[in-house]
Image (spheres, rainbow, N blue to C red):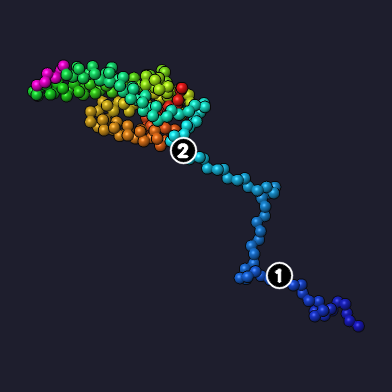
Amino acid sequence: MSDPGNSNPENNPPPPSTPPPPGGTPPPPSTPPPPGGTSPPPSAPPPPAYSAGAPVPVPGGAVLAEAWKRIVATLLDGILLYIVVGIPLSLIASALFDGSSSAASLTTLNVASIIGGVITALIYFAYFALMIANTGTTVGGMVMKLKVKDQNGGDVTMEQAMKRSSWLLLGIFPILGGCASFILVIWGLVSLFTDPLRQVPWDKFGETIVIDAS
């Protein structure tokens, strides 16, 4: 009579084992789901690429001024200031220089040119700073219906207007100032068509933007 506690191993084969996958490496354990059973939120889509021709909204619901309008407004201001300042100073310099090539006459002309450059730079600076601080625009900006605002859409302070116009004081320096002004103008033209907020160097320094007020 056989003992139930001593069963024959041949009559009780071991359970079949799971064959390993090809290559002999067991499968990695599955990653448990995050707590709560929810999947991670999808990543936010990238912001749309800036297009130089598309209007860019700014705080307050305004729209940035188009580049060509700003260029025309600047030209109008330049013509106005040349009529008011440039022509009278040229007439004064011509009256001081009698046409002779004497050393005294040349010295007088050089001194008059330096003084004229200083006066012109100060008048240009005062014109843009005072007009923008008090009205938010210039005569050219009024014609083209433009407004200068701070970067949050508020009114420009006197400090911002002075900082924004300070580059015009480079005209005080006869040669270096002219070269620096020329570089800034070229930089500004490039920025009008490439910067997302169309901020030229003096806009960035004054923390201002120019909007369409039409």
Name the residue type under label 2.
Tyr
Callout 2: few (<14), some (14-19), or many (20+) C-alpha neighbours within 10 Å?
few
Give residue 104's quadrant in the image: top left
Residue at the spot 40% in from the left edge and 30% down from the top edge: 67
Residue at the spot 26% in from the left edge and 33% down from the top edge: 179
Nearer the viewer's eye, disc 1 or disc 2? Answer: 2
Asked whether the viewer can see residue 27, the reply is: yes
Q: Is residue 163 left or right of residue 110?
A: right
Give the camera-side residue of 74 and 18: 74
Q: Is residue 103 left or right of residue 209?
A: left
Residue at the spot of label 2:
50
The residues colored magenta run: 95-100
Residue at the spot of label 1:
18
Instruction: Look at the magenta stretch and give its main secondary structure.
Output: loop
Q: Say above or below: 9 vs 207.
A: below
Name the residue type under label 1.
Thr
